[in-house]
Image (spheres, helix red, strand yellow):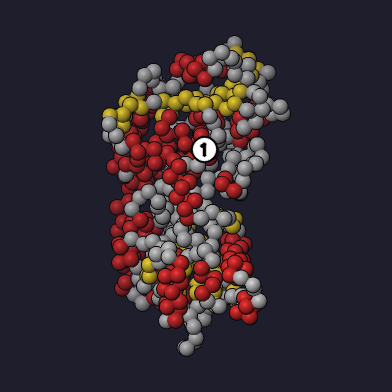
């Protein structure tokens, strides 16, 4: 034990026993305690950019020097400046959408391993934070499974946020004490976590107290198992955020945010030139031209060109961005048509390869795919939607039923600044955002051709259900083959599940 300013602290949170804590309560600060970083700027910046755009992020950056000066006078005033710059006049539904779909991924990557080990062992988990409740609520409730928390409340006018803080103000200092007493009106919390002197007052109300050292430690190990497929994770692990949205790849520090804003005009011009190459040059020259403009195309085991009078091959690929079929064509040095479930009119106009729209009607889509294969090779993304994390969604069995010749393609897209996919934004700009990256890359690996279950074997099955099961097995085996090549985890998640998770935050 150690005594600091008359308050007795346990030596190290790493040494705190976690056995038989199920009936215990814990209350923790968020920034610098449950999260490793003490700075909330990156999370304000993510909301500013994804809910307000580049100009809102610029306004937040301009407010940072003032917030930094005020911090040494009043922490509350400093936070109020950041809140006003981020949220003033912004639609509440846009803030809530960003908080559900964007922030949990970045919050979860910043969780303090030592604090989480003890926090997750307790039966009643409580959090107090100076950050606006509207920002942190989805992460705390759905990812950390926190039922009780107190955060700063921002005022609204109609459907928009005013950027002002509601009474009693920012949850710092004495307001943290009031928040703890509100959460524990008739009892004393068993454990309290904090990271700075302003946390001492609320920690005096706790039986055990732990100061989290202000050092960068390893993040909490993330489970490789998708949250919607596992109910019993180890206590010292949190579910990995499988689906997330937002355009920014990296959590923005002030310097990185400034660089991003300065890069946007350059990136737009660069994207226009990169996209124009697909129209101006034959496909066999596109890879070389793109490499001169900073786009890397890495190809492994490309098959030879098809012979005449041979039925078309169906290339079934993992789905990372809308550009997957385009880069497969670039890798093969010839345009290959693609079938897709959803594509904007702008993306279809800008595509250098033919695209055919599917309508999620099984019989109609099957006829469309068969018709296209009669005319030559075809690309399909059996997942039906993109996934950014190292997971593969469930493959539709439709493609496995239609042709004997399927070549699995392991596709990996690398982006350093902007994501080339979106759920909440305008999908027509996905290609632009991919090509706006300073040095994006695509790795295309062609895997051995997979044969369909023969008609002779299918004829031995007694009913259609058995035949359907055989084709599903073929689709699953192709999914596993691609997953093993990419070291991605194969899941049973589907497109509707992805959109439901991003919409609800669960």
Corner quadrant of residue 171: top left
Corner quadrant of residue 93: top left
Tell which of 340 and 46 is nearer to you: 340
Residue at 33% across / 33% down in the picture?
A: 87
Corner quadrant of residue 155: top left
Residue at 43% across / 65% down in the picture?
A: 361
Picture coordinates of residue 474, whole percent (x, y): 60, 69
Residue at 54% across / 54% down in the picture?
A: 493
Picture coordinates of residue 213, whole percent (x, y): 58, 28
Picture coordinates of residue 338, whole percent (x, y): 42, 70
Residue at 41% across / 29% down in the picture?
A: 132
* The N terminus sits in image quarter: top right
The answer to whether 149 is drawn above or below residue 297 in the figure is above
Picture coordinates of residue 150, whole percent (x, y): 47, 24
Q: Is residue 241 left or right of residue 80?
A: right
The crowd level at tag 1 (other Cα within 10 Å; few <14, some 14-19, many 20+) is some
| Residue 415 seen in render | yes
Tell which of 233 and 410 is nearer to you: 233
The answer to whether 270 is drawn above or below residue 139 in the figure is below
| Residue 70 seen in render | no
Q: Which residue is mark 1?
A: 142
């Amino acid at each position: 034990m150690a005594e600091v300013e008359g308050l007795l602290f346990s030596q190290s949170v790493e040494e705190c026993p976690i056995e038989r804590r199920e009936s215990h309560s814990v209350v923790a600060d968020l920034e610098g305690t449950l999260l490793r970083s003490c700075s909330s700027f990156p999370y304000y910046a993510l909301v500013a950019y994804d809910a307000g755009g580049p100009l809102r992020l610029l306004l937040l950056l301009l407010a940072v020097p003032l917030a930094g000066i005020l911090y040494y006078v009043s922490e509350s005033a400093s936070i109020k400046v950041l809140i006003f710059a981020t949220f003033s006049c912004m639609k509440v539904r846009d803030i809530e959408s960003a908080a559900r779909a964007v922030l949990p991924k970045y919050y979860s990557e910043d969780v303090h391993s030592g604090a989480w080990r003890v926090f997750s062992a307790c039966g009643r988990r409580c959090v107090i934070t100076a950050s606006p409740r509207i920002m942190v609520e989805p992460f705390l409730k759905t990812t950390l499974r926190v039922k009780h928390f107190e955060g700063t409340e921002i005022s609204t006018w109609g459907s928009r946020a005013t950027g002002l803080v509601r009474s009693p103000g920012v949850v710092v200092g004495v307001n943290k004490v009031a928040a703890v007493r509100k959460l524990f009106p008739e009892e004393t919390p068993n454990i309290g976590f904090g990271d700075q002197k302003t946390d001492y007052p609320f920690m005096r109300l706790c039986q055990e107290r732990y100061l989290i050292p202000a050092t960068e430690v390893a993040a909490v190990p993330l489970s490789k198992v998708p949250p919607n497929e596992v109910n019993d994770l180890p206590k010292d692990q949190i579910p990995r955020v499988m689906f997330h949205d937002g355009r920014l790849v990296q959590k923005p520090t002030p310097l990185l945010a400034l660089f991003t804003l300065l890069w946007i005009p350059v990136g737009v011009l660069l994207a226009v030139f990169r996209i124009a190459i697909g129209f101006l040059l034959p496909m066999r020259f596109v890879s070389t031209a793109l490499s001169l403009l900073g786009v890397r195309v890495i190809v492994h085991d490309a098959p030879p060109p098809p012979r005449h009078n041979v039925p078309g091959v169906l290339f079934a690929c993992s789905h990372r961005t809308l550009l997957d079929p385009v880069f497969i064509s670039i890798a093969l040095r010839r345009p290959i048509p693609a079938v897709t479930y959803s594509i904007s009119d702008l993306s279809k106009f800008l595509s250098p390869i033919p695209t055919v729209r599917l309508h999620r009607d099984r019989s109609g889509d099957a006829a469309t795919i068969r018709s296209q294969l009669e005319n030559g090779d075809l690309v399909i993304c059996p997942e039906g939607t993109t996934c950014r994390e190292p997971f593969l969604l469930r493959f539709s069995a439709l493609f496995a039923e239609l042709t004997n010749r399927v070549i699995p393609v392991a596709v990996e897209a690398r982006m350093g600044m902007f994501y080339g996919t979106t759920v909440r934004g305008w999908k027509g700009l996905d290609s632009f955002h991919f090509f706006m990256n300073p040095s994006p890359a695509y790795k295309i690996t062609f895997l051995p051709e997979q044969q369909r279950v023969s008609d002779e074997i299918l004829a031995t099955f007694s009913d259609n259900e058995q035949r359907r099961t055989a084709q599903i097995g073929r689709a699953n085996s192709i999914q596993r083959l691609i997953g093993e090549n990419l070291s991605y985890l194969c899941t049973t998640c589907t497109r509707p599940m992805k959109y439901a998770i991003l919409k609800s935050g669960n």
